Amino acid sequence: MLGWRLIALLVVAAAMAGPARAGVISVFYYPWYGTPALGGGWAHWDAGGHAAPADIAASYYPARGPYSSSDPAVLRAQMAEIARSGIDEIVSSWWGWGSAEDQRLPLVLRAARAQGLRVAIHVEPYAGRTLASLAGDVEHLRSLGISRFFVYNPWALGDAAAWTAWRANVRGVVLFAETTLVGRAAAAGFNGVYTYDILVDSGEQFARLCAEAHAMRLLCLPSVGPGYDASRATGDTRVKPRRLGATYDAMWRSAIAASADAITITSYNEWHEGTQIEPAATSPASLGLPAYADYDGAYGLHGRAAEGAYLLRTAYWAGIWHARTLLAAGPAARP
């Protein structure tokens, strides 16, 4: 395995290559959290009847505590963490015009761009979402300088023929479909496919997915993640254990071995589903909190050092990934 110093040098070299670099790493980001101090009440932390701030709708407890996504200081710190991890782009969850996520988007854009991060949109299944509304969404979001869109559950909006007709009138954007139905995505006019759900699409399918995508001249963006645990938030009994980081490593290896064109990470801060790589508190019981899981022991780290274990590991894999894609791109893309 490559040493940490070499990994850091590779990350810097890849960053210096600028826009010509292939192999973007994107992370799904959730700007939907609120607190009484900023927003007039708890949002998401108290989902399902939980009593924030001590009792939150998550199996892990954030190291920075339950925060507001409207807090510029929080956004600045998050984007700095993401950028230091070698990630190139955040894919911000978006739930329609006027939603909290839409209203916070200018704050997200400002904080992300200050760190040199690109911003794409994850078009979620908001109430009333249709192909017609999506056309307006794209126009609205393009006015903010956004041109890349990840569409969750695209087939709920129409079949391939409906998407083809829609695509003929919407140009100048890059569209990715959350699907493993590669032929349908190609017929619908998408630029690529991604998987998002790390519980269902665990990595074994990545090689087949990317082979099919490349045969159809589509980009393949498999989604990697550290694990899944929504038991405290939703009562979902399905769990994908983190195995002290082994789960995350295995998904990264599968994505790289599949000759992916880019990598998506599920997620930076989807705390409800326990897929987050954002720092989590270690031994929260010592803080007088209910029992939560933590990252202690991940990658051999313990105590406070373990809180950022998955961001550190992301930097490790980002260094390897960017170095490989930089070499594959040839001399013209190198600094």
Image: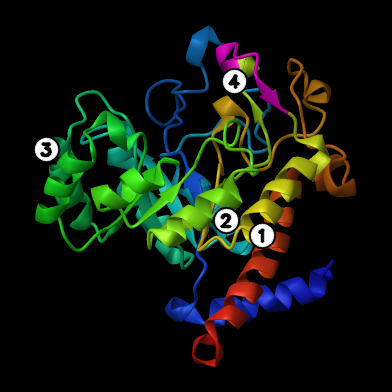
Which is in the foreground here, disc 1 or disc 2? 1
Near mark 1 (Cα within 10 A), the count class, few <14, some 14-19 or many ≥20, is: few
Which residue does the numbered mark 1 point to in the structure image? 257
Marked residue nearer the N-terminal end (2 or 4): 4
Range of magenta residues: 233-240
Label 1, label 2: how many angstroms apart (C-alpha)?
Answer: 24 Å
Q: Earlier in the sequence, mark 3 or mark 2?
A: 2
Which residue does the numbered mark 4 point to in the structure image?
Answer: 53
Q: Are marks 2 and 4 in contact (CB under 8 Å)?
A: no
Amino acid type at image mark 1: Ala
How far across and how far down the image is residue 156, in percent?
28, 29
x 62%, y 54%: residue: 255
Q: Which residue is mark 2?
A: 82
The correct choice, above or below, for 186 with respect to 16 in the image is above
Q: Provide residue 68's location: percent of width, then percent of height.
A: 47, 34
Is residue 55 magenta-colored? Answer: no
SS under mark 4 = loop
Quadrant of the drawing holding the N terminus:
bottom right
Mark positioned earlier in the residue sequence (3 or 4): 4
Kind of residue at badge 3: Ala
* Left or right of 180 in this view: 235: right
The residue that appears at 25% across and 53% down in the rendered structure is 189
State the quadrant of the C terminus: bottom right
Structural distance between the alpha carbons of marks 1 and 4:
42 Å
> Residue 132 shows which numbered tag?
3
In terms of image quadrants, where is residue 179? top left
N-term-proximal mark, 3 vs 1: 3
Q: Is residue 150 visible?
A: no
Q: CA distance from mark 3 to mark 4?
A: 40 Å
